[in-house]
């Protein structure tokens, strides 16, 4: 007898902002609606309330309330909300967004009126298969994290140090590499949440807003957190925030997607140039010159749609299809043989092969195999890396 199945469809960062939001996902809706659960990372508040904080460098992450129609038309019924921009307009816009999502039948994860609520997992069930979701954020502006007595997002603090490659006393100004260490108490709390959720679900998905934006390279703490989450019982790890694709890893047979990239992200043209352009100027990376409402570099238009099949025995299949923004800023599925498909496939394989990950084509989809080609511990790989974030140099085309 065939066991009941639950289908999860997941994408990365979503930031709708258009005159007719219902059109945003029209080219991918058929695939999105294949999910019993369809989720994304919501990168903005959907509200007309609140006032922007004076210390926000890029005050563009609040969109008019009608943009919730993009999510409902796309079939989303879950959003991760532990993101670094979701308190830019204060608690009024934050809570207004949560209320609007609830009224639209969309569950939210990673945010709440206090720390307990922000860390609380979300459980969703279909066909007798129960799936749990856990969410936390490492990209934390001061005051955005929830505390026992303050609303906010679920925190996963990380400390940053700079380690000279040579003896700094012999050579002042010697180059350094970037060392990151996750806060032990926060990681223990996340892992405890995963352990508790696993006792009540057939599988657990852990989602983290983390990493370094615009680069294909991983920060040192990312595999440390991902591996700890899997040790605690997570069956799948999803990453957001870098705005571009990053490697797919495997640990104990469980897939780790370090970054799902931008899936749909649009702002007014001027806001894109003024806002994100400030950050890009630090790295010498230009804004997208073809899609003017896409406030990121052009390599951030490459994305994937993740398709996961789950039964009472856990995750059975992890696959994805490439997606690319077209010139109207619409995400569009790339079919096998198309230039966009070949580009994204080659990029992910190039990033993932050094980690030993095997990806095969199957019925027009790319499937992550449950065993590595060779044993690679990504934590050790990053510890041994001498130069931090080399891709930033490769992507830079403008003088810094």
Image: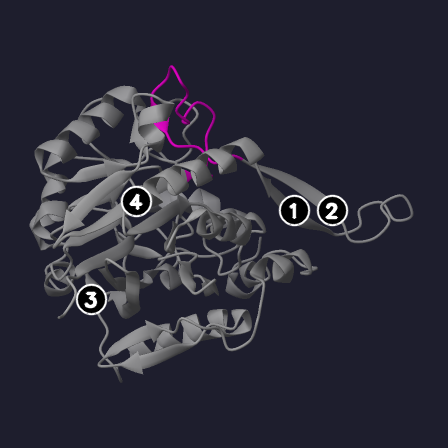
The residue at the point 49 percent across, 73 percent down is 372
Name the front one of labels 3 and 2.
2
Cα separation between marks 3 and 2:
42 Å
**Residue 101 in view (yes/no):** yes
| Secondary structure mostly taken by the magenta-highlighted segment of the chain | loop
Horizontal and vertical percent for residue 77? 15, 46
Q: Residue furthest top?
A: 149
**Magenta-colored span:** 137-157
Q: Residues within 10 Å of mark 2 (few under 14, many from 20)?
A: some
Residue indicated by mark 1? 179
Residue indicated by mark 3? 332
Q: Is residue 61 above or below residue 339?
A: above
Cα separation between marks 1 and 3:
37 Å
Asked if the stretch drawn in magenta spans residue 153, the answer is: yes
Name the front one of labels 4 and 1.
4
Residue indicated by mark 4? 133
Name the front one of labels 4 and 2.
4
Q: Residues within 10 Å of mark 3 (few under 14, many from 20)?
A: many
């Amino acid at each position: 007898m065939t066991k009941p199945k639950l289908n999860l469809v997941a994408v990365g960062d979503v930031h709708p902002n258009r005159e007719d939001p219902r059109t945003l996902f029209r080219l991918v809706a058929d695939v999105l609606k294949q999910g019993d659960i369809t989720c994304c990372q919501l990168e903005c508040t959907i509200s007309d309330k609140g006032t922007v904080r004076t210390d926000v460098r890029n005050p563009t992450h609040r969109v008019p309330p009608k943009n919730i129609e993009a999510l409902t038309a796309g079939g989303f019924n879950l959003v991760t909300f532990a993101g670094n921009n979701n308190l830019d307009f204060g608690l009024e816009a934050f809570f207004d967004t949560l209320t609007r999502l609830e009224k639209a039948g969309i569950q939210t994860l990673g945010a709440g009126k206090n720390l307990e609520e922000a860390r609380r997992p979300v459980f969703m069930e279909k066909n007798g298969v129960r799936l749990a979701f856990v969410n936390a954020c490492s990209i934390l502006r001061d005051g955005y994290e929830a505390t026992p007595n303050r609303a906010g997002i679920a925190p996963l603090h990380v400390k940053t140090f700079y380690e000279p490659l040579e003896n700094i006393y012999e050579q002042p100004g010697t180059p350094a590499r970037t060392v990151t260490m996750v806060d032990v108490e926060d990681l223990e709390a996340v892992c405890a949440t995963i352990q508790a959720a696993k006792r009540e679900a057939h599988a657990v998905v852990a989602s983290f807003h983390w990493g370094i934006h615009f680069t294909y390279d991983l920060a040192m703490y990312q595999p440390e957190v991902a591996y700890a989450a899997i040790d605690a019982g997570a069956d799948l790890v999803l990453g957001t925030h870098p705005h571009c694709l990053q490697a797919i890893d495997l640990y104990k047979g469980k897939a780790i997607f370090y970054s799902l990239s931008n899936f749909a992200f649009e702002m007014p043209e001027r806001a894109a140039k003024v806002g994100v352009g400030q950050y890009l100027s630090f790295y010498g990376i230009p804004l997208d010159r073809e899609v003017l409402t896409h406030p990121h570099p052009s390599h951030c238009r490459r994305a994937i749609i993740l398709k996961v099949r789950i039964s009472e025995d856990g995750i059975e299949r992890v696959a994805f299809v490439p997606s690319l923004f077209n010139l109207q800023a619409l995400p569009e599925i790339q079919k096998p043989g198309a230039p966009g498909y070949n580009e994204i496939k080659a990029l992910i394989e190039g990033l993932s092969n050094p980690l030993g990950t095997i990806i095969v084509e199957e019925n027009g989809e790319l499937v992550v195999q449950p065993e590595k080609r060779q044993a690679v511990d990504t934590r050790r790989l990053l510890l041994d890396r001498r130069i931090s974030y080399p891709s930033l140099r490769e992507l830079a085309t403008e003088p810094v």
